[in-house]
Structure formats: C-alpha cells, structure tokens
Amino acid sequence: MDKREKAKKVLDILEREFPEAKTALDFKTPLELLIATILSAQATDKLVNKVTPELFKKYKSAEDYAEAPLEEIERIIGSVNFYRNKARNIKACTAKIAESHGGKVPDTLEELTALPGVGRKTANIVLGNAFGKNALAVDTHVKRVAQRLGLTDNDDPDRIEADLCKIIPPERWTKTTHLFIMHGRTTCKAASPKCETCPIKDYSVYYKTEYKGTKKR
Ligand code: SF4
C-alpha cells in the first residue's frame, strides 16, 4: 500500500474515532489563538486555558499587549513553563503586529513566521484554526504518530510537515493535526502505546516491527 492510500485509510478511521476533534485551546479571535499557542509550547492546553481568561480580559488588542508592563504579563502567565521567555515573545510579536500589520494578526505563513517567536507550528495552528485555511501543524504527537505509521522517515518537524502534505489532500491538513494529536494523547502514547487496542494498528510500521518484536521476546 502506498503512503497516500495508507494516510487516507488511517484518517478515515481516526475521523470515525474522533468526530469532534479540534484544538483544545480556548480562543475567540486570531490574536487570542496566537497568544494561547505561544503559551502552549511544552505546556498542556489545560494549563494554558487556566491562565488565558485573565490575560484575554485584560488585553484585547495587539497594542494592549505591546504596551503592557512585562512583569504584569509574567505575573498572569507565571504558572506556565518558560513564562519569562513566553512573556517576552508575546510582547515582541504583538509589537510587530501593531507596527507592521495595523494591529491585525496576518493570515499568511510567510507573515506569521516573520513575527518574533512564531515558528511554523504556531503559524499553522493559527492559520488552520483561526483563519480556516488548510494548514498542517507538526507537534510532538503528530511527529510520533506519523513516524510510527511509517508516513515519514524524517525527524525534523518541517520535513515531516512537507512529507505529510505531499500524501494528504490539502482539505484534510488541519484535521490531520487534530486527529493525530488526539490519537497520540489517547492511544499512541510516547512511552507505552496501546497497540493491541489501536484502531489503526494494521497500518502501523511500529506495530509490525518494534511492538510485536517486543512481545515475542
Ligand atoms: S499500533 Fe501502536 S504505535 Fe502504531 S499507531 Fe497504533 S498505538 Fe501507535
């Protein structure tokens, strides 16, 4: 079976498993999602959703964040990993949005990734979820699931994104991110994947090689 066909079958099954799959981050505007996504690096969505209500209530526009005292943003997001760096990134990227984009979050990959502290993953999450564009974001779950299924041989997230975008039609890119994240969180866990009960094990290279090999020993 070629990789295109495998990806289609896997996504069809995961769509049935997770019909409601969507981002777990709470947001109402592109700016809110951008801020929440910056905060979510190496932090759980649950924790991010705990700190963003106060942040979003206090700061409504890019200018508000850019002009806010750094210490005040640090105080509000203090329970999130790397909050000092994240507070600086939030201020730097909102300042650029205020200066160069009239206060509106840009809606292209090129413009988003030109913002300080915004990489392809964050940009793709914003494009796919706040702007409704086709965008595949590769986080740790997407990377692991794609590798274990044998849909990519790469380790670098940008290359994995390119590999997946070649074999998955654009209209499924955004959903692929959500489905792989859900599958990675619930079944294809990093340390102990639940391979025996996995609904896509027939398509998994890891199951056929490493997992079954482990069980035989
Ligand atoms: S069979 Fe195991 S490794 Fe393969 S996708 Fe399912 S949970 Fe992940």
Image: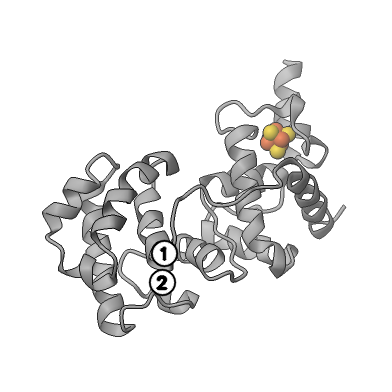
Task: Write the residue at 78% across / 44% down.
Answer: 16
Residue type at mark 1 is Gly
Q: Provide residue 87's location: percent of width, then percent of height.
A: 23, 56
Q: As rendered, which of 211 and 201 lies closer to the eye? A: 201
Q: Amino acid at mark 2?
A: Thr
Q: Nearer the viewer, residue 24 or 163?
A: 24
Q: Residue 85, image x and y in percent?
A: 23, 53
Q: Is residue 59 left or right of residue 128?
A: left
Where does label 1 land, which residue? Answer: 119
Which residue sits at x=51%, y=51%? 139
x 22%, y 65%: residue:
65
**C-alpha separation, residue under disc 2 versus residue under disc 1:** 5 Å
* Contact (Cβ within 8 Å) of mark 2 with mark 1: yes
Residue situated in front as seen by the camera: 204 or 209: 204
Disc 2 residue crowd, few under 14, some 14–19, many 20+, Cα 10 Å:
some
Instruction: Tell me if 138 is positioned left or right of 208 in this view.
Output: left
Question: What crowding class fits label 1: few (fewer than 14 Cα within 10 Å), some (14-19), or many (20 or more)?
Answer: some
Q: Is residue 70 left or right of residue 182?
A: left
Residue at position x 61%, y 54% in the image = 177
Tell me which numbered mark, 2 or 1, is placed earlier along the sequence. Answer: 2
Q: Is residue 168 above or below residue 179?
A: below
Residue that badge 2 annotates: 113
